[in-house]
Amino acid sequence: MEFNRISIIGLGYIGLPTAAVIASCGKVVIGVDNNQYVVDTINQGNIHIVEPELDLMVHSAVAEGYLRATTEPESADAFIIAVPTPFKAEGGEDHVPDLSYIEAAAKSIAPALQKGNLVILESTSPVGATEKMAQWLAEARPDLSFPQSYGEDSDIRIAHCPERVLPGNILQELVSNDRVVGGITHRCSTQAADFYNIFVKGECVETSARTAEMCKLTENSFRDINIAFANEISIICDELGVDVWELIKLANRHPRVNILQPGPGVGGHCIAVDPWFIASQAPESSRLIKTARAVNDEKPSWVVKKVKKLVAEVLTNTDKNEDNIRIACLGLTFKPNIDDLRESPAMEVALEVSKVFNSQVWVVEPYLEELPESLLNFGTQLVGLSKAMEADVIVLLVDHKAFVDYPIQIGSNQRALDTRGMLKIR
């Protein structure tokens, strides 16, 4: 089948780069988003997120007529759904996945479906979500046949293909990384793989939809567990007076050991979220996964306690008082050199510190022009890096390149907490 007209539902951190890459291959791409600002921004050849080189690719695709954004789905040969899968608000600590965004996206494209169309769910989802999407589509379009009922002879092909890219390097990894393509039937898998081969240079490995869903969740749970080990070791080392950064370097000299670097927690739209999708469906069997999540979720609170301890040291050893002490938090994003705050442990630390010390907190974040309202409500200020060096307590939360390259000098009356082991302290 020819895929000449592609529709991408959801123009966020994954949908927009995917749309731009496909458009750069000479395919007509219609991006769909319910945010009018996003639609208008893209149609002007601009972008609403920070991702290296994405602005140039979007501008070129729009100028050449290959990329256009709209709020309403239109007919296409293939539909890619790339919308969020958050937790239900009422789920509380159970972290119940909320599939309402996927359901809404499926129902929005249903009127535009035609015989022979391919629908791919890229949203990271709990096992079985692709089948639910297929059912929602079938209920909306009883005049068409779907693979869950008609097998290989269905009018519509449906598959799941999770993204596995790293923010800050998305455009390269969308093309170079292998893709796991899982169809509801073998023919669905094959047709979806044919689609991805338009722009993917990595291998497109075919499997079932459920296996593809579980693969993405397993990958990120594996990473979460390994990060949790590093974070737990960092806490133990702090208690025992051991330099965790030196320890890890030494331990990693073992030929079969590769301990990751600890940090203030785990953030982002994948690693901090996906393990819960497994735990929510198999709560009795996912003990290690849930323990790792607990370790990583509790790390920001540990960092806040360390900050309070450093503040107490400054108050004890200087003439500073609780009303004029200053704390500087370096970084808010969930990883370095991007603007993404989703599930960011750095953001959580800065917010909790701001709640305690109110208007005495400074934040340095080179990838934001203004602070989130939640921080502004406590009088937190966005300042430059040189200004932040005047603070009494300096807390490195994100290893942005701007921070790593800065020769920070800590005075005898100052204190510093480096959660990333990257500061060049002079």
Image: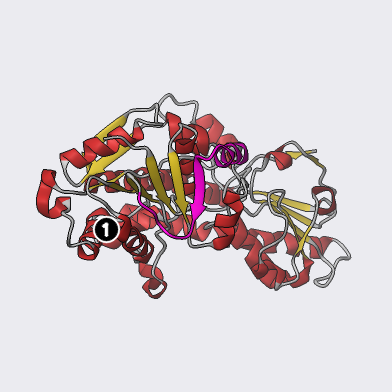
Task: Tell me the crowding category of disc 1: few under 14, some 14 to 19, or many 20 or more residues within 10 angstroms, Cα based.
Answer: many
User: Between residues 133 and 394, which one lies in front from this camera angle?
Assistant: 133
| Quadrant that contains the C terminus | top right
How many badges with numbers are in the image? 1
- Between 215 and 36, the one lying in front of the other is 36
Q: Left or right: 130 with respect to 357?
A: left
Magenta run includes residue 68: yes
Q: Position of residue 418 (x, y in %)?
A: 67, 47
Q: Position of residue 56 (x, y in %)?
A: 62, 37
- In this rendering, does residue 258 appear at all? no
- Residue 161: name its quadrant: top left
Residue at screen point 67% across, 72% down:
355
Residue at the extreme top of the image, as rendered: 255
Residue named by callout 1: 133
- Picture quadrant where residue 305 is located: bottom right
In this picture the colour scheme is secondary structure
Q: Does 380 appear in magenta?
A: no
Q: Where is 282 relative to 16, above or below?
A: below
Q: Nearer the viewer, residue 257 or 222?
A: 222
Magenta residues?
55-75
Q: Residue furthest right?
A: 319
Where does the image place residue 425, in percent across and percent down from the top left? 76, 40
Measuring from the top left, give residue 196's x and y in whole percent: 35, 35
Give the residue drawn at x 35%, y 68%.
94
Q: Amino acid at mark 1?
A: Met
Label 1 secondary element: helix
